[in-house]
Image: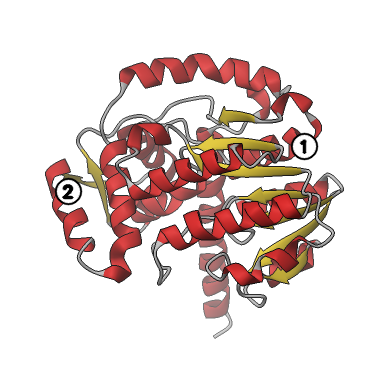
Amino acid sequence: MTILVIGATGTLGRQVVKEALNQGYQVKCLVRNIKKASFLKEWGAELIYGDLSIPDTIPITLYKTNVIIDTATAKTSDNYRGDIIDCIGKKVLIDAAKKGNIKKFIFCSLKNAELYDNIPLAKLKLDIEEYLKKSELSYTIFKIEGFFQGLINQFAIPILENQSIWITNESRPIAYMDTQDVAKFIIKSLDLYTTENQTFNLSGKKMWSSIEIIKLCEKLSGKKAKINYIPLTFLGILKGITQLCEWTWNISDRLAFIEILSKKNQSAIDIKLCYIDSLYKIFNVTQENINSLEEYLQEYFTSIVKKIKEMNYDRKDNFSQF
């Protein structure tokens, strides 16, 4: 079976590539920049040029492909609007998949996107979900909320570098997951007939608020965080400003998403905790097999401390030679 991964150089995409290769699948990666994606080739994947913002480049990439796994989304640094990728490009991809007799299409979306349909990014994801469901392709949709990896830049590095951390007063807890675990769920779905034409909300085994994550980072790093609180009204103003310039539209979309995520929804939290156990049973996964945030951050801070000690040792050794 040959898998084509869309968004293969991204935080999740690269883990999907690695897991698929580990499980013995042939993997092709649609990439815009062959040079930047060279590490995927070193792992054993085949690189194929393609760009979701240029629909004409898509059909040829499906040659000798059985499964498509789409992990791509527009970045805030992209110089075109998210709807070019998340709507136009992906609809072309789905149409091409149908014509190319692709056996399965796996799409990564946003958890609870239906609650945020006033946000362009969420609405676009919902549109693609519906388009995929109506395409008559065999599909599986994974809806994801947050990754451990994103917390490093948001919390861990600012604490280590004595920089300020900006959070809202009303930040609600999120069940973050390690992208390695998400990738395992995605690849497992290829062998489970019960996942065909189904949608799954992927959740970590514990929910974390921003304050709880900061306290954990403080404990593991031995350093005190500098916390600044952002009023939700300020986020609204900033979102309005970024909507004025075309090059900041992607940033505006994400600010709107952060604003909504900051509002607590207790009923959604209760439902989520009940859902986790049933999800793990479907995929034959136990909570012990899922990485915890404590373990992930412990490993991160331990590696950082080790590197600092090695740097200090090398510096001391160099001085001793004089």
Seen at 81% across and 62% down, the residue is 63
Q: Which colour scheme appears in the figure? A: secondary structure
Left/right placement of residue 209 relative to residue 105 reads left
Structural crowding at the residue carrying mark 1, measured as other residues with C-alpha within 10 Å and reported as few (<14), some (14–19) or many (≥20): some
In which quadrant will I find the C terminus? bottom right
**Between residues 112 and 59, which one lies in front from this camera angle?**
59
On the image, the x and y values in percent for residue 296 come to 55, 40
Cβ–Cβ under 8 Å for marks 1 and 2: no
On the image, the x and y values in percent for residue 282 come to 69, 20
Query: As shown in the figure, which amino acid type bears the numbered disc 2?
Result: Gly
On the image, the x and y values in percent for residue 43 come to 78, 62
Left/right placement of residue 230 relative to residue 302 reads left
Residue 221 in view (yes/no): yes
Q: What element carries label 2?
A: helix
Pointer 2: what residue?
A: 236
**Which numbered marker is on residue 190?**
1
Quarter-of-image position of residue 90: bottom right
